[in-house]
Image (spheres, rainbow, N blue to C red):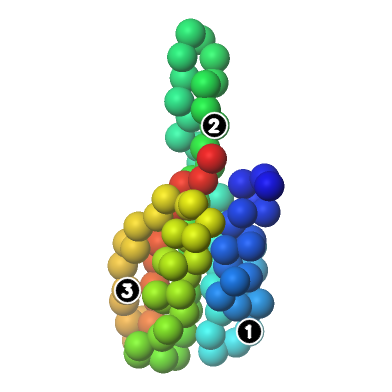
Amino acid sequence: MTWREQIIAAHLAVTDAVSHTQRLQSDRYIVWQEDGANDLTGDGAHAEKTVTGTSDLYTKLEVDPWGDALGESFDRAGIAWSLVEIEYEEETGFYHWSWDWEVA
């Protein structure tokens, strides 16, 4: 399974309201995107390649079970991750959860 397929599967295990980079017109959805690499090099070559990225949950629910579910889904898929922040955006009325992740 490619890194992209791993990331998509981990998100789809939580919801089908998920998009690559584009916001959806919904009160509850997840957006993800890759943002770089963190490759391990040795002897002038890439010994191991990883992709880093972010996932963002936008929800009108103050306590959203998708937040915990996404972390659990990353764990099951073997994806390294950290929850970066949860903030309320007054101008939109959304709670915004943000994760950083890395997958080989």
What's the amino acid at mark 2?
A: Lys
Q: Which mark is residue 49?
A: 2
Left or right, 31 with respect to 63, comes to right
Between discs 3 and 1, the one toward the N terminus: 1
What's the amino acid at mark 1?
A: Gln
Spatial CA span between label 1 and label 2: 34 Å
Between discs 2 and 3, the one toward the N terminus: 2
In the displayed structure, would residue 86 be above or below residue 77?
A: below
Q: Tags 3 and 1 in contact by the CB under 8 Å rule?
A: no
Helix, strand or loop status at disc 3: strand
What's the amino acid at mark 3?
A: Ile
Neighbour class for label 3 at 10 Å: few (<14), some, many (≥20)? some
Q: Which mark is residue 86?
A: 3
In the displayed structure, would residue 5 be above or below residue 63?
A: above
Neighbour class for label 1 at 10 Å: few (<14), some, many (≥20)? few
Q: Is there any visible trace of residue 94 in the rendered image?
A: no
Spatial CA span between label 3 and label 1: 20 Å
- Callout in the foreground (3, 1): 3
- Image quadrant where one finds the C terminus: top right
Tell me the residue that label 1 is attached to. 25
